[in-house]
Image: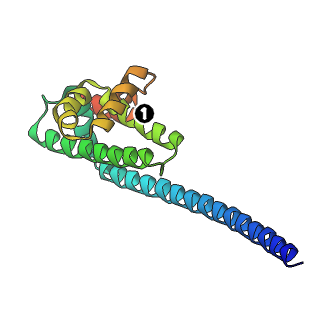
Amino acid sequence: MIEDLGNIGDFVSGIAVLATLVYLSIQIRTNTNAINSASRERVASDYRDVLKSQADPLVVRAISNGLRNFPDISFEDKVHFHFQMNDESLFMQAAFASYETGQLEEETYHAYLANYVSFVNTPGGKKWFEEVVRPIYTRGLVEAVDQRLLAGGLVDVLSLSVYQSVEEDTRQS
């Protein structure tokens, strides 16, 4: 009889352990989803901040000129271009780190990477990347950019209307 009670106790404790493991598994999954969601929101917020600084027509002109002709641009344009490209690169470095640690899902990461690499894939963007990013940013980010460049299928940012407008204004002046 005591042995039967011991078996029942073992069975009940086994069920309790199983229930605890199921509960913890659900909590871990919920926590992971919350972390991933917060990471996506943080990354999107960071990128909105980068874009807000590009609302100034002088900055847009500098970016357009830099993407086409860096380093052969005016000092003022070079300063704006350098800071904007560094903002883009620092953003991409943070998105890359979030992706590497599993806090940013693959689809979102690859969308940001393709956008960033599209800017790097311009005549001035390539020169700026070689001069600034390749020597000082993480090797992982540089390798990811190199691989994405090789994959192709990137947007031609110089054909975007905002950069075309700048080019047309420059020719009319």
Residue at image position (51%, 59%) is: 35
Quarter holding residue 29: bottom right
Q: Give the labeled residue for mark 1.
A: 114
Is residue 164 visible to the viewer in this orientation of the structure?
no
Identify the amino acid type marked 1: Ala
Please state the horizontal and vertical placement of residue 97, each as a whole percent of the image.
Answer: 37, 47
Residue sitting nearer the eye, 141 or 29: 29
Residue sitting nearer the eye, 61 or 35: 35
Assign the C terminus to one quadrant of the image. Answer: top left
Number of residue marks = 1
**Can you say whether 50 is above or below 166 in the image?**
below
Q: Residue furthest right?
A: 1
Residue sitting nearer the eye, 77 or 131: 131
* Label 1 residue SS: helix
Residue at image position (29%, 26%) is: 122
Assign the N terminus to one quadrant of the image. Answer: bottom right
Please state the horizontal and vertical placement of residue 81, each as a whole percent of the image.
Answer: 21, 40
**Can you say whether 77 is above or below 51 in the image?**
above
18 sits left or right of 107 in the view: right
Please state the horizontal and vertical placement of residue 152, each as a whole percent of the image.
Answer: 42, 21
Is residue 24 visible to the viewer in this orientation of the structure?
yes
113 sits left or right of 143 in the view: right
Please state the horizontal and vertical placement of residue 30, each as a whole percent of the image.
Answer: 62, 61
